[in-house]
Image: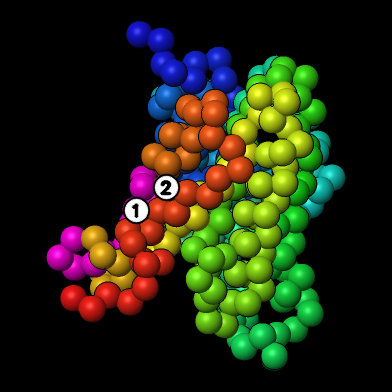
Amino acid sequence: MMKQFEGRTAMVTGAGKNIGKEIALAFAKSGANVIVCDYNPQNAEETVQEIEALGVGAMAAVCDVRDREKIFAYVAAAVERFGKIDFLVNNAGGSAGLLNKLTRFVDAEQSTLDFVIDTNLKGAFHCSQAVLPSMIAQKYGKIINISSIAAICGLYDRVDYAAAKAGMIGMSKALAMEVGEFNICVNCVSPGAIERDGAKWAHMTYMGEDGHAGTPKDIADTVLFLAYQDYITGENIVVDGGRSLGPSHR
Ligand SMILES: NC(=O)c1ccc[n+]([C@@H]2O[C@H](COP(=O)([O-])OP(=O)(O)OC[C@H]3O[C@@H](n4cnc5c(N)ncnc54)[C@H](O)[C@@H]3O)[C@@H](O)[C@H]2O)c1
C-alpha cells in the first residue's frame, strides 16, 4: 500500500534526539525521505540509520542552523539528491539553559541573547530561505515552526527564549501571507512541557490524574497533521495538555 508521503522529502532540524527525532521518524514512517539536520554528528547519524532501516532515503546535514552558508549548501545537496524539499520543520532550538546561562534579563550577556535569538529565530530564517526556492518552483510546500508556550505565556529567566519563540509565530503569519499563492503553508506548533531524554514530569498540566507532561509523539502527531493539511496557514497550534490555561486548582 502506498504511504501518504511516498516520494516526498522532509527536512527536520534538531532531528538528532527527542522531539526532532520523533518528527523525523514520523515522516519516514509515512514514506518520506528525510534530511536530518543536527549539529551533533553522532545523534544525526543514529537518526539517519533508524530512518534508512524503515526503507526510505535519509541524509545527515551536520551543521548548526546558525550557520547560514552551511544550511544553504546542505539544502542544495539535498535538492540535488532528492529532487526537491516538500516539508521543513524548524525544530532546532532551546534556551540559554543550553549554555548553562539562564538568568534574569537585566543580567543577561549580549552573547547569550544573540545565541538564543540566532538559534531559534534566525536558524528558522536561514532554513526557510534555503528551502523556499524549491517549494516555490514546485508550487507546494509546508513549513512548520516549533515555537513554545513561552511565546504566549512568558517564562521566567528566559526573556530571550520567549521573544525568539514569539518571533517564530510572527514570522509564520507574515510568511504565510507571502507564499500562499504558491500553495505553501506556514504554521507553528507550540509545545508545553514535553518529556526530554526519557525524563517524565507530573503536576504540570490538566491531563490525567497526575497532570503529566506530553511526549515527543504528541508533537510529531501535530506536525504530521499540519503536513497533511493544504488549507491551514498562519496558525499556531498549542500542544500543552492545558498548561497555558493557567494554574490548576484541582
Ligand atoms: N521539550 C520541551 O518541553 C519543549 C517545550 C517547548 C518548546 N520546545 C521546543 O521544541 C524543540 C525541541 O525541543 P527538545 O526538548 O526536543 O530539545 P533537545 O535539546 O532535547 O534536542 C534538540 C536537538 O537539536 C539539536 N540542536 C540544538 N541546537 C542546534 C543548532 N543550533 N543547530 C543544529 N542542531 C541543534 C541538538 O543537538 C538536539 O539534537 C526546541 O525548539 C524547543 O525549544 C521544547
Magenta segment: 208-218
Q: Position of residue 43 (x, y in %)?
A: 53, 48
Q: Residue at x 24, y 60 (%)?
A: 207
Q: Secondary structure at mark 2?
A: helix
Q: Whole-Å distance between the Cαs marked 1 and 2?
A: 7 Å
Q: Residue at x 33, y 77 (%)?
A: 247
- Point out the image quarter for the N terminus: top left
Instruction: Give residue 203's quadrant in the image.
Output: bottom left
Furthest residue to the bottom? 107
Q: Position of residue 126 (x, y in %)?
A: 77, 46
Where is mark 1, residue-wise?
215
- Point out the image quarter for the C terminus: bottom left
Q: Residue at x 42, y 47 (%)?
A: 219
Where is mark 2, residue-wise?
219
Q: Residues within 10 Å of mark 1 (few under 14, many from 20)?
A: many
Q: Main secondary structure of the magenta part?
A: loop
Q: Is mark 2 within 8 Å of ligand 1?
A: yes
* Residue 35: assigned label: none
